Image (spheres, helix red, strand yellow):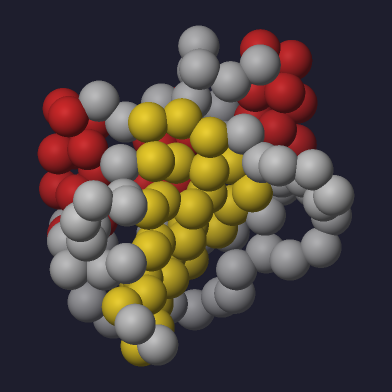
């Protein structure tokens, strides 16, 4: 499973792979999200916009792509979208923290502080 930090415009975003244990925990946290419709929108614009999770080898809990941003989780399967609330940004914070030691330290600190993920 690959995580992309959606932060740059005009150059490639940094990314890292989850370990098998982290991938299992991610799916567990994802499946624990409430089945109610999310209230909010994925962040747009400049700077940190969120985290994008993909797996080129398989679906992730039945989804092709999962975007986590601003307290909202958007799961895509083909052209269908499903939203879940990420109360207190628990999943987003946990997933961002898996990038510690895998991302450039200064970028990790800047994004963590600006997006209030640490």
Residue 86 versus residue 31: which sits nearer the camera?
A: 31
The spot of residue 49 in percent (x, y) is 67, 54
Q: Quadrant of residue 41?
A: bottom right
Q: Quadrant of residue 114?
A: top right
The spot of residue 65 in percent (x, y) is 38, 63
Q: Residue at x 34, y 82 (%)?
A: 78
- Residue 43's place in the image compared with 93, above or below, is below
Q: From where the camera sits, is residue 65 visible? A: yes
Q: From where the camera sits, is residue 88 visible? A: no
The image quadrant where one finds the C terminus is top right
Q: Residue at x 58, y 59 (%)?
A: 70
Q: Residue at x 70, y 33 (%)?
A: 111
- Residue 20's place in the image compared with 26, above or below, is above
Q: Residue at x 14, y 39 (%)?
A: 24
- Residue 34's place in the image compared with 78, above or below, is above
Q: Quadrant of residue 5?
A: top right
Left-right relation of 46 to 85: right
The spot of residue 1 in percent (x, y) is 30, 41
- Residue 38's place in the image compared with 102, above or below, is below
Left-right relation of 40 to 38: right
Furthest toward the front, the residue is: 57
Q: How many marks?
A: 0
Left-right relation of 53 to 18: right
The spot of residue 31 in percent (x, y) is 17, 59
């Amino acid at each position: 499973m690959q995580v992309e930090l959606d932060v740059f415009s005009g150059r490639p975003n940094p990314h890292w792979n989850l370990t098998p244990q982290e991938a299992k925990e991610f799916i567990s946290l994802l499946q624990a999200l409430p089945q109610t419709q999310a209230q909010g929108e994925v962040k747009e614009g400049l700077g940190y916009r969120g985290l994008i999770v993909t797996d080129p080898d398989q679906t992730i809990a039945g989804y092709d792509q999962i975007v986590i941003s601003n307290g909202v989780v958007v799961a895509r399967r083909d052209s269908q979208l499903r939203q879940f609330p990420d109360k207190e940004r628990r999943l987003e914070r946990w997933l961002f923290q898996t990038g510690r030691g895998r991302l450039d330290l200064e970028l990790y600190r800047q994004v963590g502080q600006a997006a209030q993920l640490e």
